[in-house]
Amino acid sequence: MIGLIAGVEPHRSNAAVMESCGKRRSCDSWRAASGGAGAGDGNTGIMDETVLFLVFRSINWEPRLICLAACVSRRLRAVARRVLFRELCVARAPRMVAALTAGGAAPAGRLGGGWHALAKLLFFCCGCAAATRFFAPVERPAKGHFVAESRFSKTSGRSFLPRRCWGDLLYVSDTCEHAASTGGGEDLGAYRGVFRGFVRSRTRAWLIGKRAELEARTRCPYCGARVWSMTAAGLVPRSASRRLGAHHGSLEYFVCVHGHLHGYCWLVHLSSSSSSGDHYSSSSSSGEDDKLQEEEEGDEGRVQF
């Protein structure tokens, strides 16, 4: 492997040698950014961080395989949390990650809750397993699952912020629909999002200033931290219901101390004539490769397996 990366094979073309040298510089840059980890920490073979970096880069940072690797041992879990999940987020959602880490929002490359939490938020719908204080009981719990496609938008995120908090940056996904057995013509919708620099956000400052209480029984499904109910805090604007396509008052969402958002709502079924121009419905797969595709405005993106 070292010989191939260094380009020392005598019969290789100049183009192949230049490509290999470029990959080596990319790997060296990553090792320098990570403090040279993996070279002298005693890990060899598959436990070497450089080897893991190259292996998972070659398969385009497949999320399920990274999760499986993290379950093998404590060492692999540590490498996955420190390196692999970060590279997954950067590779699949480059503009979103750039926005979330801009302006010192991620000091020393660290995100609140960890990169593994952001990776899970990008690719995993938490569903709705139980009723909450302000959300109607669920007859048939919606289990969490990997999503085949998601779109995150900061324009959608602004719809979830009251006017006093419009200075915050919040990305929110399209709604993931789950069939419910209520018989009332409504489906359960689950959605998720993330704040940039939540510690310095106006939303957090308002919650702290008003001494909003943290929920006793609800935890963040992405990082396990305690959460605030935005419904209990009175921070749910009417624009959130319009964005989701739900009746006002039939939704609830939470924000954890690290800035991860998750919530639920009852979606109103629309007729085919009224739904043709609906701006919050998820679009179908466009057949593009497995990475977050940014829209022309640079505001929205689609992530696919």
Image: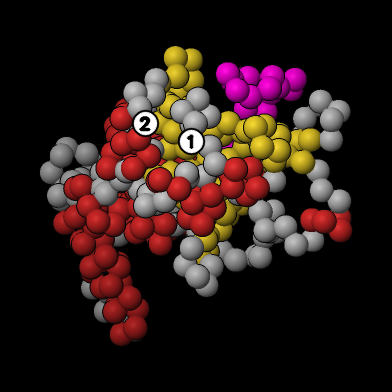
For residue 118, say whether it is visible: yes
The answer to whether the residues at label 1 and label 2 have Cβ atoms under 8 Å apart is yes
Name the spot of residue 76 as percent of width and height, x first. 33, 35
Instruction: Please provide the residue range marked out in magenta.
Output: 123-143
Left or right of residue 1: residue 284: right
Residue ID at (54%, 67%): 295
**Residue 114 vs residue 219: left or right?**
left
The image shows residue 254 at horizontal and vertical percentages of 49, 31
The residue that appears at 40% across and 45% down in the rendered structure is 164
The mark nearer the N terminus, 1 or 2, is 2
The quarter of the picture where residue 5 lies is: bottom left
Residue 235, label in figure: 1
* Image quarter (top left, top right, bottom left or bottom right) of the N terminus: bottom left
Instruction: Specify the label residue 207 is tagged with.
Output: 2
Residue at the spot 40% in from the left edge and 62% down from the top edge? 95
Res 289 quadrant in image? bottom right
Q: Main secondary structure of the magenta part?
A: loop
247, above or below 215, in the image: below
Residue at image position (67%, 58%) is: 279
In the image, is residue 100 above or below residue 13?
Answer: above
Q: CA distance from mark 1 to mark 2?
A: 9 Å
Please say whether residue 109 is visible from this viewpoint. no
Q: Quadrant of residue 202?
A: top left
Question: Which of 124 and 16 lies nearest the eye of the viewer?
Answer: 124
Q: What element does badge 2 sit on?
A: helix
